[in-house]
Image: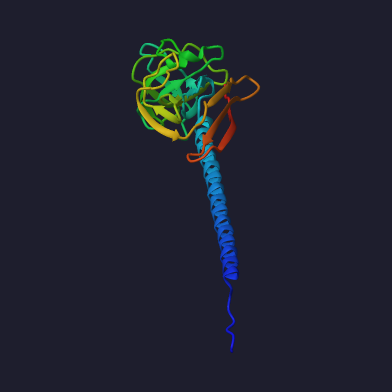
Amino acid sequence: MRRHAGFTLVELIIVIILLGIVATISVQFVALSTSGAIDVGARQQRALQGVVISEQITRELRGAFPLSVRTSGSCIEWIPIAAGTSYTELTKGPDFDRISVAPLSNVPAIGGIRAVVYGYGTPVSSLYGDSDPGPVSSEISAMDNGSSPAVITLSESHRFSRQSPEKRLFIVSEPVSLCQSGRFLYRYSGYARDPSQPAPPIDGISEVMAANLQGNVDFQFTPATFRRAAVVQFTFTLEDRQGDETTTVSQEVQIRNVP
């Protein structure tokens, strides 16, 4: 009688078990590879986000009037420089509304800009006030940059409290603040000047600069001196939206100091 070759039930069960093991290992390998790729992508995205945020803050701070920077908790405030020049004659009577300066290479747009002659030893809060005499003028209403010397016309009379050792005059715009609120870092502008540093929420225009923050943003400020520039150090931590990983960014910004 002829016998037929085939697989026994035990052999079939063994094959099925082996195939199951191979399939499980393959699935786990693919899952782990996919998870690893996602984690790497998330780290790269947080790192890129940190670089972009840090660069935005750095670029803005480098354009700050160095003696105007002030910090309070997770907030930093400064007055941006729109232009700079040297004056030949400050305001004088009877109107006290004109300043003679060297022609500007970059003429800022009229609107919300002021002239600053800052003497060392003057309180920082005076840069945010409207005192007369004081280091900050009333708003500039017109600029004749074609004449020699150029003439800056103020909207109201003003007398400067001090002079610059190098006759430096700065044109500045309205104050800007960066403040943390919860997990977000906001940029505030277009609000009223105040001798006391405002705390969030601040009236005016607010823009989100960073999200998914963990902990508090730390701003540290070292004032300028005759021998070195002002320095701002800031640190913030970004948290992964879907995990527990974090990325911490620290940056130091030097703000050139010109008396």
Q: Residue at the spot x=57%, y=70% of the render? A: 9
Image x and y of residue 7, in percent: 58, 75
Q: Nearer the viewer, residue 21 or 218?
A: 21
Q: Looking at the figure, which quarter contains the N terminus? A: bottom right
Image x and y of residue 250, in percent: 59, 32
Image x and y of residue 94, in percent: 36, 11
Q: Is residue 130 above or below residue 65?
A: above
Q: Nearer the viewer, residue 238 or 118?
A: 238
Q: Is residue 107 above or below residue 122?
A: below
Image x and y of residue 149, in percent: 45, 27
Query: Hey, which residue is sitting farthest front in the picture?
Result: 1
Q: Quadrant of residue 14?
A: bottom right
Q: Looking at the figure, which quarter contains the C terminus? A: top right
Query: Hey, which residue is sitting farthest bottom in the picture?
Result: 1
Q: Residue at the spot x=48%, y=11% of the render? A: 161
Q: Residue at the spot x=46%, y=24% of the render? A: 79
Q: Is residue 95 above or below residue 47?
A: above
Q: Nearer the viewer, residue 149 or 68?
A: 68
Left/right of residue 86 with respect to residue 201 in the rendered view: right
Left/right of residue 150 with respect to residue 25 in the rendered view: left
Q: How is the image coloured?
A: rainbow
